[in-house]
Image (spheres, grey):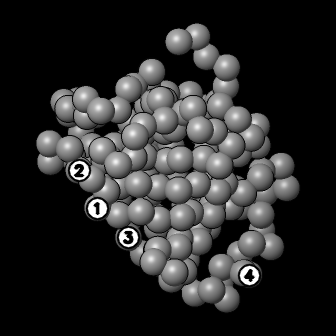
Amino acid sequence: MAENLEIERKFLVEYPDCDKLNAVRQIEILQTYLENGSGGSQRRVRKITENGTDVYFYTEKEFITAVTRKENEYEISAENYAELLKEKKADCVPVSKKRICFMYKKQLFELDLYPFSDEFAILELELDSPEQKIFYPEYVKIIKEVTGISEYSNSALANAGAFPIIDK
């Protein structure tokens, strides 16, 4: 099991022209939240489809700060995935999204596109440290940083089926 510290920042962005992103990877993600683990850790399973092939992952996260969390993630079998789905959180809709990964100035950005919006998307960037300088792609319009804002979590977006109303 890989255990590491995940330092990540998230941004609400206008839905970009995806042709300008120079994608290095495009995947479909179906993410299901499970009942919390010991100590209140967040648990989830993911079915990731890439080039017609499905791969499954189990993840457990402990939140340290809004930007930093301890993450344990590993690949699981289709059978284990199906078994873990029985532990699905009753109040949480599965998250369906398309992720486009692209490089900009030696940074790997992940753009999440949700089926309920053609106006907004979420841009994520994993960092080496919380203070790391970020170089923002000029072809992606950032509306605001949403790191640590619960209304912009994957589960909140999926449950609402929409982005929160914002003042532009």
Q: Classify 10 Å Cα crowding around label 3: few (below 14), some (14-19), many (20 and above).
A: few
Q: Quadrant of the N terminus?
A: bottom left
Is disc 3 in contact with disc 1, using a CB cutoff of under 8 Å?
A: no
Kindly identify which residue carries mark 4: 83
Q: Classify 10 Å Cα crowding around label 2: few (below 14), some (14-19), many (20 and above).
A: some
The CA span between labels 1 and 4 is 32 Å
Q: Is residue 111 left or right of residue 139?
A: right
Give the secondary structure at mark 2: strand
Give the secondary structure at mark 3: strand
First in residue order: circle 1 vs circle 4: 1
Kindly identify which residue carries mark 2: 103
For the residue pair 114 and 144, the one nearer the viewer reads as 114
Q: Residue furthest top?
A: 167
Percent from the top left, x then y, of residue 22?
27, 53
Q: Amino acid at mark 4?
A: Glu
Kindly identify which residue carries mark 1: 24
Residue displayed at 49% across by 47% down:
112
Percent from the top left, x then y, of residue 80?
65, 84
First in residue order: circle 2 vs circle 4: 4
Q: How many marks?
A: 4
Q: Is residue 108 above or below residue 10?
A: below
